[in-house]
Image (tube, rainbow, N blue to C red):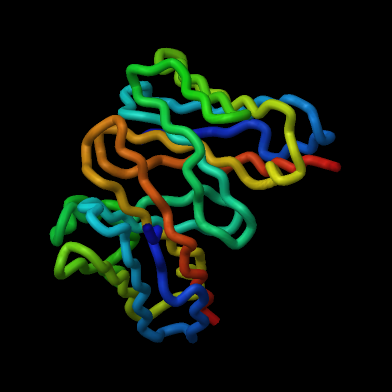
Amino acid sequence: GAGVSQTPSNKVTEKGKYVELRCDPISGHTALYWYRQSLGQGPEFLIYFQGTGAADDSGLPNDRFFAVRPEGSVSTLKIQRTERGDSAVYLCASSLTRGTSADTQYFGPGTRLTVL
Amino acid sequence: KQEVTQIPAALSVPEGENLVLNCSFTDSAIYNLQWFRQDPGKGLTSLLLIQSSQREQTSGRLNASLDKSSGRSTLYIAASQPGDSATYLCAVKTGANNLFFGTGTRLTVIP
């Protein structure tokens, strides 16, 4: 079956603009995660959804960042008033369940965001 | 806060060598530990997952071990091949649902 997909693969925008990044998780996966990876670093957690609700948004850096998952499947990460420091690869992952030690997260290819 | 460290940051080996990548973490209260592979410009591919109750996992030429009490894991790659060249990331899952990642080891296998 299909893996996690993310669109667009690349996004170039200007400082101050609004962007939306989309994630399609693996079918049937109830848990969905967003991470951000800066150059030369490991991914850093942003937000976690269980179903439609954001169960943990403690990793969002500020209120310019927001994410939704209205039907419990596709998720959109929204960034308002983008800044150059937002430039990074945004990774989405999904997993079948939550809270178990056997839970494997499957990652998408990421969206590379460049803010000029 | 959980901190994950990977040593070395980069490693070059000739084809055919066996090698070990190291990962350490500060908080031993983990659910599991995962090793991922990341190719340039690509997402992450899960290689092995070790549950907190397990000591090691094996898949083909890969073997990962976990010593939770000392906060360490190793990834052993046998008979390395040029196709193994990639960045290898270690991540731990704590009581929260997210993963804490190290900064990775960039492996180059020289033909």
Q: Quadrant of the C terminus of chain A?
A: bottom right
- Residue A42 position, x and y percent, is 51, 48
Q: In the figure, residue B95 lies in which quadrant?
A: top left
Q: Is residue B52 above or below residue A101?
A: above
Residue B3 visible in the picture: no
Residue under the image location 47 percent in, 69 percent down: A111
- Residue A32 position, x and y percent, is 28, 55
- Residue A103 position, x and y percent, is 30, 38
Residue under the image location 52 percent in, 25 percent down: B58
- Residue A2 position, x and y percent, is 39, 61
Q: In this view, does A65 lie to the left or right of A97?
A: right
Counting the numbered discs, the total is 0
Q: Is residue A16 left or right of residue B36?
A: left
Q: In this view, does A109 lie above or below B15?
A: below
Q: Is residue B77 left or right of residue A1?
A: right
Residue under the image location 54 percent in, 29 percent down: B23
Q: Quadrant of the N terminus of chain A?
A: bottom left
B21, A24: nearer the viewer: A24
Q: Which residue lies furthest to the front in this view?
A: A1
Residue A80 visible in the picture: yes
Q: Is residue A71 above or below residue A43?
A: below
Q: Is residue B97 left or right of residue A43?
A: left
Residue under the image location 50 percent in, 51 percent down: B44
A40, B13: nearer the viewer: B13
